[in-house]
Amino acid sequence: MNLRELCQIQGFPAVLLTTYNFDPLFFERVVLTDLLAGGAKKILVMADADQVYSSVEKAQGQLLALGRKYMIVPVLAGGAFHPKLCIRLSNKGGIVACGSHNLSRSGWLGRSQDEDSGGNREVTTVWRVEPDSHSAVDLRSVLNVLSELCNDSRSRGAILDLRDISWLTNVQPPEDRSWHWTVAGKDTNLASLLESRWEGRQFDRLRIAAGSTDSSAAMVRWAVDTFNIRQVILEIDKECCNLDPLLLTDLGIDFRLNLTPGKPRSHLKVAVFESDQSSAAVVGSANCSSAAWLRSSENSGNIESVVIYDECDPTEFHSLFLMKDQDAIPWHNADLIAHDEKKEDDSDEPDVPVRQLRQVQIEKGANTVYVRLLPNPPADQTVVAVVANKRFILSYFPAEDVWISQSVDWPEEICTPFAWVEIGSPGKPTNVVWIDDLDSLGDTSNWQLPLRAIRHLDRHMLSAGYRKLLNDLGLLSSTLLENTNDFQDKVLSRRQGETEEVQVEAQPVDPRSLIKSISDLHEGARSLQHSAGLSTTLTLTGIMRLFFYEAKDATESHDPTKSESKKSKEEEDRNTENGSDDASGVAQLHEPTEKEKRRLLQQLNNFVEKLSSAEFADRCSARQLQQAAAYPLAVAKFAVQGPLGQDIEEELSDVVIRVVEVLLKRRQTLMSNDQARILEPLLEEVFQRYSAEGRKDDFRRIIGDGVLWLVLTSSLTMVQEQGRQFELALLMRDVVQNGLLTATAIPERLALLARRLVDKESSVVYTKQASVATELVVALEDYLEKCWGGYEEAKRVFDDEVGDWLWRPEIGFVRITALTEDHRKALIHVRKRAADLANPAYLNYYMNIRQLQARDDKLRSLIDDVDMSIS
């Protein structure tokens, strides 16, 4: 299997690539295209920092997808960041390629024979990674090492998201094996690792193929001293052989060279340790040098990736060598040239200058730019970011070691935007660096979830399309409810010794401070409060993102790697499911059947039922709770815009109401083994569990950042659209008064994020009016409390109707859903319990609001005010 074929395999949506050299144009035009064709959703590239900055800068103005469809993580290591890996992951397993291939045309399209077209001579090993296998343990360890090499918390978190998928565990299978793969050089060099694994073993011969060497044959000397090797044969291109004959005179062994012509270039790295008793091998990225084998990153050594074969048949590796052993010549006959002035270099690339500007990221949702400089200029220096001829003054935040500017107006560009920084006055410009669009990259964060199914609810489809869509939604709902390990509570890491103060009893944010008016949102955002720090930066992940993007901005955004027309894109969407439905071969779109609509409602109702269970409250993570709460709201939001939601708008509105009540209102008594348990509102239940576990602050950072608050508020517009203003006011009051939803919210940030809701101005209107409605509902309940005594003494008139609102002090508001024949009892929905009572309740137990307001002018005025506040 070649690497292009590996990229095109379906079913592995997460991709991590590591490389030393990086050709960005080749990557976008070939590798990225193959990956997207294979269904890749999250694509990360880790590359040596100095090399990637240089190559990307040269391609400025020609790149379309960098920082949008894929993320580059530049790595600053003591030596070179030199591993060559291609890791593809799914929820069930993975594929790994480890070898000598760089992310360049010559490396990726490598060849083994002269007649093959294009590329270097490379070697790459590919294997499947199954759960509960040794290779899965190795993979988790490798991802952990790579995450530790990241130079910022966002990149590190992106790698940890891959490491923490549910099937990647540290459980070591009992069976032994004869091979192992790893990334070496961070803490332990490759030589030390092999000394430990092969302790006590001796070999007679060492065959090596490498892309470069150091001058003193340090790796060869180590192998001779450690394993008593007496003969070494090194195959290498003559131009890449840096051996210095003046430094080899004391070797004392049979050291021979096979010098290849370099057409094609031999870039593979193989070391086969042979003896008559047993043999071993190492294949991967490590050249024949001290930096690759003998030194860790702390001592200017390289980071390398290798496959280690503890036991092997050496003849299986002989085909990798271009020349025969008998053609090798003694090193002193090889016409080597002394070059004392030439330093060890694994890269065969020119040196690049030190770059002070290391990273530029934008977060459009918060209108903020983040800049990382190394070394940092003094904090009192004038530091200005320059983007598309726009200049933004930066301020330094030592807690996150980052410079930021806020309330910026970002230009939209077809190509990947670049920026530089000017330091001092007059400003001295730094190098140029690409800009990562955190909002676009955030679309890739929940690669495990089939989110596209939600976004497609607003479309007409083929008849088979609706069935597949409902099946995908079923898979998505089960994942959200059951796979807690897939929703780890990632919070922005802090440096050792630093702490963040979190208010012990946070108060809910006044909605009027979040969004002042629609005009404010259109005119622009206020600057953020610098004292708030960066740890509360809003990160939209998974389902949350669907609420804040139009189709053109989110899941249906233009793919810059393809040149398809809008018409062809629409045709592709329409013909996704099983071809055409008629003899002409033309796809015929269909209306969903009544059965399919009812199936959607049944799925949503079952989901909310499980969401409200004690089992879910007892095991869910805060991140899982956030995503699960948003799921039925997102389905309802998009379904009402499409054919599946037609004629069931009111039922979808009921789903939204149930979710809000389960999260914020319900209180139920559960009996188990003759013991009673009071089940509090879902947010409160999970918060109490987190508090008992000492993780209260994590819960508040995730749930309390205000994003779920905005999602709930915008979703409630569906209730008003069904003419249920009074119920909407009650729900708004529940949202506004819940302090857990806004415990760590920054009003200015949420105001900026809320600008994305203006596609439906009603969302903003209701958010703005929520505080007014809350005050009026509170006043109404206070008045009803005072009226209760007189109402009890009054004669009950039993002219109740379905839909009437009833009230009782210790229970609150309930709604009639059905009446008995004598109109003395009714089935009711109790908001306090977030449930319909199974048995009819006596109506004289409650106050009927409709009846009372007919004879109480003040009550009628209060209720009119409530209705008008959100109309």
Image (cartoon, rainbow, N blue to C red):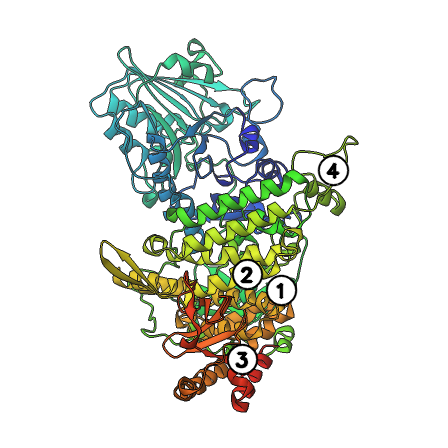
Q: Which residue is mark 3?
A: 850
Residue 801 appears anywhere in the view = yes
Is label 4 or label 2 in front?
Answer: 4
Which corner quadrant holds the C terminus?
A: bottom right
Badge 4 amino acid: Ala
How far separated are the C-alphas under marks 1 and 4? 41 Å
Instruction: Say which residue appears at 60% left-offset and 35% top-offset.
Output: 34
Q: Are marks 1 and 2 in contact (CB under 8 Å)?
A: yes
Query: Which numbered disc flags the more N-terminal residue, 3 or 4?
Result: 4
Badge 1 amino acid: Trp
Is label 1 or label 4 in front?
Answer: 4
SS for dot 2: strand
How far separated are the C-alphas under marks 2 and 3? 53 Å
> Is the residue 443 above or below the residue 306 in the image?
below
Give the x, y percent position of residue 526. 56, 76
Q: Is residue 733 left or right of residue 180?
A: right
Query: Which numbered disc flags the more N-terminal residue, 1 or 4?
Result: 1
Q: Which residue is more in the foreground, 456 or 129?
A: 456
How far separated are the C-alphas under marks 1 and 3? 53 Å
Q: Which mark is residue 362?
A: 2
